[in-house]
Image (spheres, helix red, strand yellow):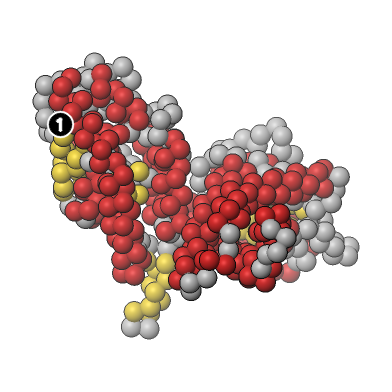
Amino acid sequence: MENLKVDNKISAELIYRSADTLIILGILILASMHSSDYNIQGYLIVGLGASLLFGLVGRFTDIYTSWSGRPFFRDEVIRILVTWLVTFLFLIFIIFAVKTSEEYSRFVLISWLFSTPLLLISSRYALRSLQASLKRIGINNHNIAIAGITEQGLRFAEMINSQPDSGFQIAGFYSLDEEINTIELPRQYAHIGNAQAMMEAARSGEWDQIYLAPTSGQSEASMRLINELADTITPIRLIPDNFTNSLLHSRYMEIAETPILRIYDAPLSTQRAVIKRIEDIFLGILLLLLVAPLMLGIAIAIKLTSRGPILFKQTRHGLRGEKFQVLKFRTMTVCENGGNIKQATRNDCRITPVGAFLRKSSLDELPQFFNVLQGHMSIVGPRPHAVSHNEEYRQLIPGYMRRHLMKPGITGWAQVNGWRGETDTLFKMEKRVELDMEYIRSWSLALDLRIILVTAFKTFHDKNAY
């Protein structure tokens, strides 16, 4: 029997967290540059506090791009910006609360606010490049095999290949005896044997890890395989199929000493629902005050350029399917609200000249802040669809109506990932629903703030807005 291979994988988490010390170094360097006589102890305490807060907040904003398909590093840049902004605002609140703000230079703090994200992003990029280089020369590298030529196995392999700094090298695929060979193995992956060959490799420690991707519905065969692998020296991991993955997203509870899985349940506890409502009221009032002059100008422009009402009302489904009237600035010559509503299309002749600009910039959605304050909507959540469209798609997409386990939003996770606008194919609506459900399962205050910031950046250049 071969000896166990030494695990030469360098901990990415340790390297990335070490870069957070730049938060402390950044404020100390800025303070020393600003004045030769500065309170090093005070700035050191602020830097240490920020570093600890950044790590804590980062636990709630650590959301990766496997959801959206964007490059991993681009997603991490957004996460760093949101995490640092929340950290800085919270730290400033503490400084003012303890009445020590006069001890710190505003110039240093503002410079620190803008320079820290640049330092963190550049250091993370350098470290990721280093890890990718180490992988190419055989350091920081795990040789892994995947057992099962299945959809989830191939998807996992693609994700590994899209992240060259992951430290994993795919040796190939084993085919399992119970598989129904309906999926062809792509040319870039080697077929390295059957289930028996996989068992021999697991016993000899040929690979650093073996990932099981069994065929869906073969539970008995999968359990038999897992039991046989118990007598091996290789770490074994399971890639869940769609059914298992849905169970993993479920929450556990206990009633009358009986364990219960909450498969389809309200996603927010009472406490989390209160937090989200406070967020909606606070940000809703703040944003309404900021955009009130703009809304007045839009109302005047609509009234002067086309005949009809300023506001457009349409029946939508809200939380748990309750109906409400969503508000928008009118952008068309028609105000459809019946059982057969045609979606807006590119170069739609019904759209007014002012309406075209409002739809492109998403400014037609501004009146929905009143829906938010009324409690019918949230600032962030699954976008509400017309009732007729709900009735259509609930017949075509399994689990479609689970979107209504949370209040609909002015913007949402699907929209910032490019799935807004016309759903002229079923696939587009399926992707929108998929991302909506991922948002519902993973809701956090930090995620909402991140979506709001991304929405603000994308408002005027969204190719799907028309």
Q: Position of residue 105 (x, y in %)?
A: 58, 59
Judge whether 14 appears above or below 131 on screen: below
Q: Position of residue 291 (x, y in %)?
A: 29, 41
Can residue 152 be seen from the camera position used here? no
438 on left or right of 386: right
Please give the name of the residue rendered at 43% of the width and 52% of the height, measured from the top-left corner.
Answer: 449
In this view of the protein, which residue sits in the foreground, 149 or 316?
Answer: 316
Looking at the rendered structure, the number of numbered marks drawn on it comes to 1
Identify the image quadrant of the C terminus: top left
Identify the image quadrant of the N terminus: bottom right
Judge whether 409 appears above or below 231 on screen: above
Q: Which residue is mark 1?
A: 310
140 on left or right of 66: right
Amino acid type assigned to the residue bearing label 1 in the image: Ile
In this view of the protein, which residue sits in the foreground, 171 or 377?
Answer: 377
Direction bottom: furthest residue: 257
SS of the residue at dot 1? loop
In this view of the protein, which residue sits in the foreground, 273 or 394?
Answer: 273
Please give the name of the residue rendered at 19% of the width and 42% of the height, measured from the top-left corner.
Answer: 326
Please give the name of the residue rendered at 35% of the width and 43% of the height, measured from the top-left corner.
Answer: 411
Q: Position of residue 353 (x, y in %)?
A: 25, 18
227 on left or right of 82: right
Please give the name of the residue rendered at 45% of the width and 38% of the height, measured from the top-left corner.
Answer: 457
Can residue 466 be seen from the camera position used here? yes
